[in-house]
Image (cartoon, helix red, strand yellow):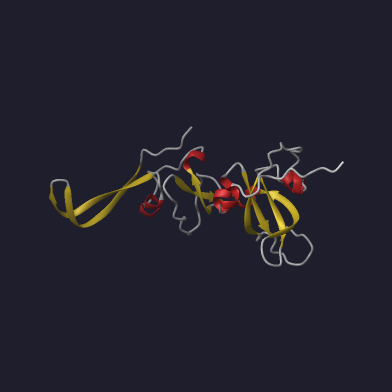
Amino acid sequence: MLLIPDWGICNGNCETLGENDCLIDNECRGIYISTCGGDVPCQGSDDTFSECWSVSDSPPLSESGCSSYDAGECSRHNECSAVHAPKFNGGASDFYFCRDEADTGPGSCTGDVNCRALPPECPAGTTPGIMDGCWSGFCIPLDQCESLPSCEDKGEELCVASSYCDPIYQGVNCECQGDQCECERWDYQHCEGSTLTPSS
């Protein structure tokens, strides 16, 4: 009997998403193109994001780990990403192997940042992801964070970049009329948490 592959839905919402949103969405999985070159599959670290595909509606048949899955089983796991050979004219061709999505994931909302790089500019309701002591380059929705970094520990640059912290300034040499003030300059004082918090 011929078995029909139970792939995810085609032309759905997932295929409209970029890498960041794709990896965060529980119903989508990232599809990558191997940059190793040649016809032999290889597990390179610089595989490039190609497309976002839907996770299969069928439940997983195995929990042995992404690296052990074939194309069909890989498609059933949100925590896995598939790496394919490149097409001549772009896009994904033959399936090469399955890997942990965490290899290219958004990171976590909290953690120490030891690198000198600047965080990405994240929209309201998100926070820069942290991975391996630096910024992951992703913006994680606050409602998917188990906890948020303390605002009080942030300097001005990180406070301004955060969508859940408010920088507090003090005006110098100000002239005020009612609630409106014009000041010679505004000096950064400290960072406070706003009312925006992750949902339970």
Q: Residue at x 56, y 54 (%)?
A: 18
Number of marks in the rendered image:
0
116 vs 185, nearest the viewer? 185
In this rendering, is residue 141 above or below 173? above
Q: Which residue is drawn at 77% across and 60% down?
A: 41
- The structure residue drawn at horizontal position 57% and vertical position 53%, both measured from the top left corner, is 19
For the N terminus, give its image quadrant: top right
Specify whether 8 is left or right of 107.
Answer: right
Position in image of residue 40 (x %, y %): 79, 62
Residue 132 visible at all: no
Q: Nearer the viewer, residue 186 or 80?
A: 80
Q: Position of residue 73 (x, y in %)?
A: 75, 44
Depicted 168 relative to depicted 38: above or below: above
Left-right relation of 89 to 155: right
In the image, 156 versus 1, the foreground residue is 1
Most extreme residue toward the top is: 200
Work out which residue is located at the far right of the displayed protein and give it: 1
Q: Is residue 84 visible?
A: yes
- Rendering coords of residue 190 (x, y %): 32, 47
